[in-house]
């Protein structure tokens, strides 16, 4: 029997249909523009698809959970938190703290990127979290691909492994004014069913994410050239390379390494440009970040177009686990420099194992 | 215009062709793994019969095919040569495409061409049992078939992931009377050691080779058999190319392009060596001979020409060949038979000398060509053979663009009737386009053993 803490951000997703690019602080405006709350419907879809009743539910009152459980035909649950109306980020965090205090095994939330961040703020890596997608933007990788997949993951939460998944911090103010600033905010623990191809009941590829990260790290460590500058990060795949070198990584930032030593930790763009002046022979090692598979422009914006041009695009090494690549069949680049993005071309080699790479298609956002 | 060109059983070649006789200089010798000195016949006696060791080292141009072996080969040989007219029409090419169809053998591939003589020579020297490894199962089922015909026992160590994924290959071996064991197994010390370290390992060809060699060395009545790479295996396969030469001669044709896929390299050798011999000796110097490999394991296009071990553990003699490094474990592509870090030393030598031109393709483009082939010629080819189909299609398209009426010949080495799950994966868009990060690796092939 799994105990699940369940909450809904009732206003999540309202901004999308009325062109608000997110609903943070905009729910009144969204409602004024005629938006209809949709998070509840998405959550009901997911919970109605649950195959069994072997879950013990903890939730919040009224629109923050209870209503959805009832609509999905679930009548046994405990209400642990009663929010003020209208609900806000503080309610999400308070509900999560109540779930943790009650000893839940998993926190399931229905919302978007901002909700994910609030849940992560409160839960951290204490227990796994899982998002039912309902937001305007979902750059974070903590969401199931759809409500049905969420149902499957909740049902099997106790038996499937978890993996590190990016929580992204998207600046909604900037986003509404046409700029996308997505920072890597942290890594949540998310239940995961390995990508598999069923064909005649055979599993072709079932990759162990941890083994894959180790293989990638071993390979990159092996091909490092003396005296060259290595700009590495951000994210857990590139962090493993640092660990392989015996160095402490900046999980959410970019480090610079030369001859096995850290020459800059959590470096910003200016630091990287200065280092490149001193050491023009350089390689940049990045990994796609977030649910959409952005190679550049999300979560690693320190590695700016100027940095890439200075190091040379040919010195960009992209790494990613097979699991990540299977979940993101197309990759994106959005460095902020359209000409540079075009130079990347229509496909990219991505190192996915020890001396193994994959050729992946690149999509250029219009 | 004839679709099938058939030979009578009496026209089947009576000798195998040894390309070593036509090389401008001798092959570099294999080296003993412990001493680094050239290996001598005695080094191999504990696992191979003397006649096969003689063939391995021979520079005689021809070796007679024993009567008893020829008798068995007539079960499916001479194999048909087809003109792929419907494929030509679909491609709107002026090229003529011919293919040698080896899928007509009972196990469904070219492999029994060498399994039969290998079993025969072992039985002639009093061996009662053969141990071998198999990856995708083509070789294991062929040796099972061959040993059954000679009343010999056979134990096949099958890479565990394939054992689980290809249950019908395993069943086929059982039908032929062989024992098929998932590798690593508890039957050998080397298998047990791997299992102790990693009980969930999917296994690898390198591990399975170690188990089969250990089994053979530990049993007096048992020898080891290898289905690819070695010179004597190439030799046995040359019956394919010799038949093709005879068949094309009946329609007054000689190929401009000869194509085969390369894993260890022996089906390619089988078709191409008679044509390569004619090229080197000046009879047909312009023939374009193309070796096709997967981009995931591009031994000939991206590897180094150097001495390296034939197996992962470093137990075999060192051979001079193109290699990606004996510790390279290729990704799990569906053409399991092409997942080998090295290549036949003879094929490697011909690539090094410029007699053979290597090319590499990714999985999805290969399956796309295989589907076109199935929809025009009707044959669902094995993923390995699909590489040759892809190269043939590309050559034919080039002819469409240039207007040249070239004659293209490729080896269709086996059927894909046990590989539908791979086709399913292709249609589901789940095939990964693996490639080898050659540019990044250039400086790191340092793991090759230092010799000389």
Image: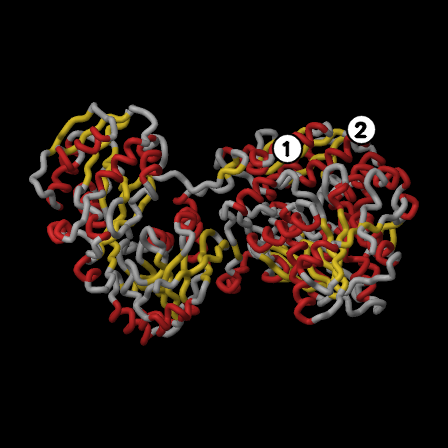
Q: Looking at the figure, which quarter contains the C terminus of chain A?
A: bottom left
Q: Residue at x 71, y 58 (%)?
A: B88
Q: Residue at x 36, y 36 (%)?
A: A161
Q: Is residue B222 above or below residue A289?
A: above
- Tell me the residue that label 1 is attached to: B168
User: Judging from the image, what secondary structure is the residue with disc 1 in?
Assistant: helix
| Residue at mark 1 shares a chain with residue at mark 2 | yes
Badge 2 crowding class, 10 Å Cα cut-off, few under 14, some 14 to 19, many 20 or more, is few
Residue B370 spot, x, y in % from top left: 63, 50
Left-right relation of A121 to B205? left
Left-right relation of A87 to B17? left
Q: Earlier in the sequence, mark 1 or mark 2?
A: 2
Badge 1 crowding class, 10 Å Cα cut-off, few under 14, some 14 to 19, many 20 or more, is some
Residue A284 spot, x, y in % from top left: 37, 65
Question: Which sits in the foreground, A254 or A360?
Answer: A360
- Tell me the residue that label 2 is attached to: B151
Q: Is residue A121 above or below residue B149?
A: below
Residue A274 spot, x, y in % from top left: 28, 73
Q: Which mark is residue B360?
A: none
Q: Quadrant of residue B306?
A: bottom right
Residue B284 spot, x, y in % from top left: 82, 67
Name the mark nearer the viewer: 1 or 2. 1
Distance in Å between CA atoms under marks 1 and 2: 23 Å
User: Judging from the image, what secondary structure is the residue with disc 2 in?
Assistant: loop
Q: Chain of mark 2?
A: B
Question: Which sits in the foreground, A365 or A229?
Answer: A365
Left-right relation of B439 to A37? right
Question: Which sits in the foreground, B117 or A306?
Answer: A306
């Amino acid at each position: 029997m799994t105990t699940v803490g369940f909450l809904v951000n009732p206003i999540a997703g309202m901004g999308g249909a009325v062109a608000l690019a997110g609903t943070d602080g905009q729910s009144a405006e969204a409602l004024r523009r005629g938006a209809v709350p949709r998070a509840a419907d998405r959550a009901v879809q997911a919970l109605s698809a649950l195959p069994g009743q072997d879950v013990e539910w903890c939730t919040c009152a009224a629109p923050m959970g209870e209503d959805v459980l009832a609509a999905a035909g679930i009548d046994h649950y405990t209400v642990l938190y009663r929010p003020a109306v209208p609900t806000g980020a503080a309610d999400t965090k308070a509900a999560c703290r109540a779930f943790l205090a009650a000893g839940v095994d998993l926190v399931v939330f229905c919302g978007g990127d901002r909700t994910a961040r609030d849940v992560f703020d409160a839960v951290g890596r204490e227990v796994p979290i899982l998002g039912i997608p309902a937001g305007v933007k979902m750059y974070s990788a903590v969401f199931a691909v759809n409500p049905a997949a969420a149902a499957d993951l909740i049902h099997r939460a106790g038996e499937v492994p978890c993996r590190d998944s990016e929580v992204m911090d998207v600046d909604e103010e900037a986003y509404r004014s046409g700029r996308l600033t997505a920072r890597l905010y942290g890594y949540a623990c998310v239940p995961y069913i390995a990508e598999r191809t069923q064909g005649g009941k055979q599993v072709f590829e079932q990759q162990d994410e941890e083994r894959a990260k180790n293989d990638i790290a071993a390979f990159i460590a092996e091909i490092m050239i003396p005296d060259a500058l290595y700009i590495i990060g951000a994210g857990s795949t590139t962090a493993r390379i640092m660990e392989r070198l015996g160095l402490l990584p900046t999980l959410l930032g970019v480090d610079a390494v030369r001859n096995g030593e850290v020459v800059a930790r959590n470096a910003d763009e200016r630091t990287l440009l200065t280092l490149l002046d001193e050491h023009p022979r350089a390689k940049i090692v990045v990994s796609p970040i977030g649910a959409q598979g952005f190679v550049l422009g999300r979560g690693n914006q320190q590695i700016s177009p100027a940095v890439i041009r200075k190091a040379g695009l040919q010195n960009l090494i992209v790494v990613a686990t097979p699991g990540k690549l299977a979940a993101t069949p197309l990759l994106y680049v959005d460095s902020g420099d359209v000409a540079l993005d075009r130079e990347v071309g229509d496909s990219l080699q991505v190192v996915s194992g020890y001396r193994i790479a994959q050729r992946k298609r690149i999509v250029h956002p219009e | 215009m004839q679709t099938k060109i058939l030979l009578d059983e009496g026209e089947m070649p009576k000798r195998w062709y040894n390309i070593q006789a036509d090389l401008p200089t001798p092959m570099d010798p294999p080296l003993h793994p412990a001493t680094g000195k050239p290996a001598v016949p005695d080094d191999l006696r504990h696992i191979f019969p003397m006649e096969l060791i003689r063939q391995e080292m021979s520079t005689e141009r021809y070796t007679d095919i024993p009567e008893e072996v020829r008798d068995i080969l007539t079960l499916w040989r001479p194999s048909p040569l087809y003109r792929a007219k419907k494929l030509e029409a679909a491609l709107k090419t002026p090229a003529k495409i011919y293919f040698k169809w080896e899928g007509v053998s009972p196990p469904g591939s070219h492999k029994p061409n060498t399994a039969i003589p290998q079993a025969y020579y072992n039985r002639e020297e009093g061996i009662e049992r053969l141990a071998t490894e198999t990856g995708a199962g083509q070789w294991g089922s062929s040796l099972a078939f061959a040993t059954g015909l000679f009343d010999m026992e056979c134990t096949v160590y099958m890479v565990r992931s394939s054992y689980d994924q290809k249950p019908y290959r395993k069943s086929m071996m059982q039908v032929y009377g062989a024992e098929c064991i998932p590798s690593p197994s508890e039957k050998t010390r080397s298998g047990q050691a791997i299992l102790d370290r990693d009980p969930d390992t999917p296994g690898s060809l390198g591990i399975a080779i170690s188990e089969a060699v250990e089994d053979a060395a530990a049993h007096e009545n048992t020898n080891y058999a290898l289905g690819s790479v070695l010179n004597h295996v190439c030799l046995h396969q040359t019956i394919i190319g010799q038949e093709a030469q005879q068949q094309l001669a009946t329609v007054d044709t000689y190929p401009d392009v000869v194509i085969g896929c390369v894993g260890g390299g022996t089906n390619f050798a089988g078709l191409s060596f008679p044509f390569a011999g004619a090229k080197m000796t000046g009879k047909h110097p312009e023939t374009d001979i193309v070796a096709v490999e997967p981009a995931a394991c591009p031994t000939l296009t991206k590897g180094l020409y150097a001495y390296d071990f034939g197996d992962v553990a470093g137990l075999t003699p060192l051979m001079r060949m193109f290699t990606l490094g004996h510790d390279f474990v290729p990704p799990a592509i569906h053409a399991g038979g092409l997942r080998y870090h090295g290549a036949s030393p003879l094929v490697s030598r011909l690539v090094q000398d410029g007699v053979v031109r290597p090319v590499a393709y990714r999985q999805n483009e290969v399956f796309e060509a295989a589907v076109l082939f199935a929809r025009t010629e009707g044959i669902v080819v094995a993923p390995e053979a699909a590489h040759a189909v892809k190269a043939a299609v590309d050559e034919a398209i080039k002819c469409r663009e240039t207007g040249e009426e070239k004659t293209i010949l490729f080896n269709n080495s086996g059927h894909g009737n046990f590989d539908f799950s791979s086709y399913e994966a292709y249609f589901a868009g789940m095939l990964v386009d693996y490639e080898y990060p050659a540019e990044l690796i250039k400086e790191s092939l340092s793991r090759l053993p230092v010799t000389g």
